[in-house]
Amino acid sequence: MIYDLINWGKLRKALLYGALLLAALGVHSLVLSHIPVLGVRAAFVPALVVFMAMYEGPVWGCMYGLLAGLLYDGVTGCAVLHTCVLPLLGFAGGFLSQFFLNRRTFACVCVAFAGLLLCSLVEGGRLLLRGDGPWSILWTVLLQSVWGMLPAMAFYFPLRALGRKKPEEL
Amino acid sequence: MIKFLKTKGLRLLAVVLAVVILAAVVSGVRGGNAGFFSNAAATVTRPLRQAATAVAGWLEDVYGYLYRYNQLQAENEALQAQVAELQSQLREAEEAVEENSRLRALLDFEERHSDFVLESTRIVDWTASNWTRSFTISKGEDADIALGDCVITEAGVLVGQVTELGSNWATVRTVIDVDANVGALVGEAGNAAMLVGDFTLMQSGQAKLTYLTEGTQLLEGDSVLTSGKGGVFPQGLLVGTIAEVHTEAGGQTPYGVVEPACDLDNLSQVFVIKDFNVVE
């Protein structure tokens, strides 16, 4: 009876998305954060939220963004910044793919890059408003997003494969 | 041939026997020295014996190799394990020597600042973000570390301040972080100023010395010390030196670029000042 209450396919799918998120956080904190290129480290976790949202829709995207934001804040040492921004990114990505965009690789890459830029801009926004060197901040925003797209693409294909599967196929 | 043996065979046998007996007698008389015949025989057979010895040696080696292969393999593995263990011990010893020198430096520092209550801790990880320069240490509330505690090196150089606290970990914001704010004294006259973080300077591992009191003359190479005002940081801790002197965008207000006295990238062990006497 209780067994029938649970949609095991959806649960399995959610767990697989969670596992991919944990792997991405591991790669970010253990590998990429120690390899600055031109003094800037790659950040790609927000792109994963966008990819997932593009295939699963705004509700799943928002929930995934919330989970990713909570964990990502812990890794980056921010207080609540990503917990607020990533659910919005997830929702926006899902909304765009539901009503306006095709779920093609190019569209996903463009939206994910925009998401990375937006997230980086929010991260550096406080410093911009404070009056710290704007060019170095904008340069960091741009590089962080560009470098972030490279590892994000490595996670795009498993996310796409998972997103295209129906829960009952899992 | 048969005819020859029949007619002269007896005579030939007698001659041969006579030669043999003669050789035996001569050999006995010479007392162990090789005679002509033995010498000749030895000379003729020497290359053959050498070849035979070489072949026998080679066969013995092959046999030994096959027979002792497993034994040598086991021995090799044991030696490799021994080398790995020795290398590990060497690394530990090197680390212990480094720690020892750090603790010796700390002892000197403690003698000069007997009021400091210090807690030794290790850096676990640096924050994975481009927007901040902070790290996590391996001790927290359980070791009586509190928020706002000051963190130094073994030589008493200021590293940063505890900004986040867990039961067995704490986050330390370094002096070059964008949110750093340290009351400072600069130059021989000890003029008051503020050391603040700046994003552009943080990327090159430096901080900004600003809010200078009127008449302060900044010179490259001047030491920057903590002022101790406000009771957050003890007075007189070395922060760094003035690397460059610039003026703000308006062109009126000077500020200094401070190079920290400690090498933040190579820090592994730091010390938290849990308590100290506040100088009013």
Image (cartoon, rainbow, N blue to C red):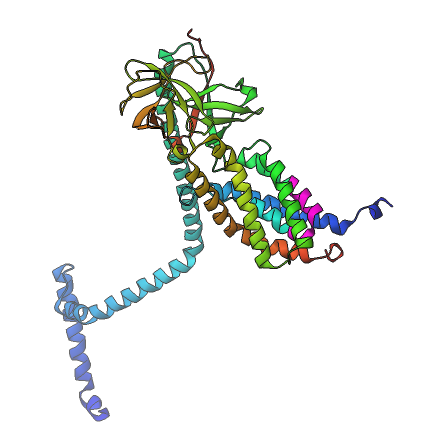
* Magenta extent: A53-66
In the displayed structure, B146 sits above or below A157; it is: above
Q: Is residue A102 above or below residue B20?
A: above
Q: Position of residue B184 (x, y in %)?
A: 38, 18
B92 or B141, which is in the foreground? B141
Residue B95 lies, with reference to residue A99, above or below; the image says: above
Q: Quadrant of residue B89?
A: top left
| Residue B211 image offset from top left, x and y in percent | 38, 20
Whether residue B126 is visible, yes or no, is: no
* Direction from residue B260 to residue A156 in the image, left or right: right
Q: Which quarter of the rendered picture does the C terminus of chain B lie within?
A: top left
Residue A3 visible: yes
Q: Quadrant of residue B208?
A: top left
Query: Does the stretch in magenta take in A65?
Result: yes
Q: Is residue B174 magenta?
A: no
- The quarter holding residue B178 reads top left
Name the side, left or right, on which A96 lies relative to B25.
right
In which quadrant is the N terminus of chain B drawn? bottom left
Residue A162 at x, y percent in the picture: 66, 55
- Percent of width and height locating residue B247: 32, 27
Q: Residue furthest bottom?
A: B3
- Residue at the spot 48% in from the left edge and 41% down from the top edge: A33
Identify which residue, B94 or B131, lies in the foreground: B131
Q: Which residue is outermost to the top?
A: B280
Residue displayed at 57% across by 45% down:
A45
Foreground of the two, B34 or B141: B141
Q: Is residue A168 left or right of residue B37?
A: right
Main SS, magenta region, reads helix
